[in-house]
Image (spheres, rainbow, N blue to C red):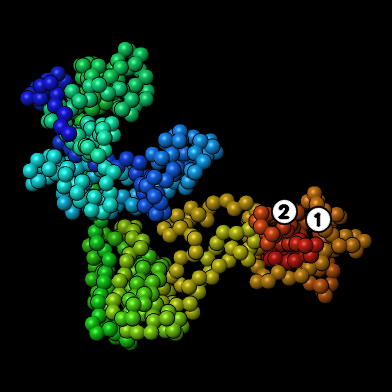
Amino acid sequence: MTTTPPSASAPSGPAASAAGTGAAPATRTMMLWCPDWPITAALREHALPADTALVLVDRGEVFACSPAARQDGVGRGLRIREAQARSTGLVSLPYDPSLDERTFEPVTAAVETIMPGVQVIRPGLCAIRIKGPARYYGGERGAADVVLQTLAAIGLTDLRIGIADGPFAAEQAARATDELDDDVEQVVVIPEGGSPWFLGSYPLEVLGQPKLTVLLKRLGIRSLADFAALRASDVRNRFGVEGALAHRQASGLDHRDVVARKPPPHLDATADFEPPLARIDQLAFAFRTRAGEFIDGLREAGLVCTALQVCLHTESGEVSERRWRHPRWFDADDVVDRVRWQLQGTNASDHGLTSGITRVHIVPDIVENLGDHADGLWGTGPDEEIHHGLARVQSMLGHGAVLTAVIAGGRLLADRRVFIPWGDAPMGQPQSSTARARDRAQPWPGRLPGPAPATVFADPVPAVVVDSRGNPVDVDPRGLLTADPSFFSPGPDDERRPVHSWAGPWPIDERWWDPRGRVLNRFQLVDHSGSAWLLLLEDHAWWVEASYD
């Protein structure tokens, strides 16, 4: 549908005054809007019927709801229990912002195949400069019809398109289609220069500035036409820069431009082999050149790869995928080594590959700025030599033959000590060095404060703690000691030592909701010789967890 102002031949009012002062005209924009996109994304992801009464829940409240749910009286901001009371067949799912972005990417990619310059405002809303596509497809309405046909081919039919001067007016035009019959019209075209007339009847709330809206209403201004009738200089002097920009939007002179997204560089590398390669040394030799090109492409983009995804395809249809980490960053030899290790491991049968390799596909999973990993003035020195030496041993003995210790989260000392293959990242730990340092600084309730013990026993050692009468010391249900510790033995057969001082207990209740959870108490104890010990009391039994030097 094309809406025509009373006089669309020449701009008038604020538009004319702006044109006379030499202000840049607004960019002719097509806005593509997908109503209820979070709902559409969730319906597609979970394969639910389109008429499902669905709500997406965020922090206990309804974030978005489907048309079927709205018919039952469900609205945004309701508590989930109240929404379920209004709609008995309501389906509730947690809101996932990443799902919106992931499912909207095919829509953006489909539009980019027919016209360039797409700017994603947010998932479900994108802007396109219409000048070039309008010339190519025979007019603005023709370009909009091509977009509708292209997206209908991928199963997306619930669309609205608005075309006007500037992104703001184009978005309002797209939303104006929601008042029309969807089977009749999905496109609203505002002629060039007609945006001020089109926006005039809209309330001030569409500007998205609540404080400015309240102030303008106190001054008797109720609509965008009333606001646009004010002189631009007066608005700027009274309301500042934000008010001046809102005044330009209300006048149909949107200052914003459509900034097309820049597709990320294609950094993947693929090598196909015909005939398939059945020997590991043949594969490593054949893939070396492609690995070098992969690393060169990263360097040209100013990047380095610190995590790599390797996917191997066989002629029988089997696929082996694995994610590899590097303590610094990958070079060509490191990439070839990971491909070989993935086939090799301890033995080839571990990966279940029973036929020749037809394709190797590597994907840079984590890339970082090359400048952040530049060598120092005097190089990396011993660190680089150590890495190459350990990597060489790993290539000969297998990926899991060289282990390194890392500090993980946990309450008990043995839980915090984790051994991982050299070059891999700890499970569940952030990948970048800055994030890892920040993660280790996070508090863990029940964690032992410093200083840490010098010796941690792989398996806790049985101990004996008794009072002055020789009775075992325990903790009552209230968490208090039944008696003061007087004698201590770090083993059931060792000589009992007098206790010089002690501290505790510090209770730990792990997974209290799980029958397999643990309830224990920690103590620090110093014997008569000055040796300090860290003890655990669990199920009325004493154990030595660690000792202090």
Pointer 2 residue: 507
Residue that sits furthest to the right in the current view: 469
Does residue 441 appear to the left or right of 528 in the view shown? left
Residue at x 43% of width, y 70% of height: 423
Q: Residues within 10 Å of mark 2 (few under 14, many from 20)?
A: some
The residue closer to the viewer here, 345 or 545, is 345
* Amino acid found under the numbered disc labelled 2: Pro
Q: Which of 16 and 295 is in front in this view?
A: 16
Q: Distance between the residues labelled 1 and 2?
A: 10 Å
Q: In this view, does 391 lie to the left or right of 504?
A: left
Q: Residue 154 lies in what quarter of the image? A: bottom left
Question: What is the x, y in percent for residue 449?
Answer: 64, 54
Q: In this rendering, is residue 211 above or below 539? A: above
- Disc 1 packing (10 Å; few <14; some 14–19; many ≥20): some
Q: In this view, does 172 lie to the left or right of 76?
A: left
**Image height check: is 500 above or below 323?**
above
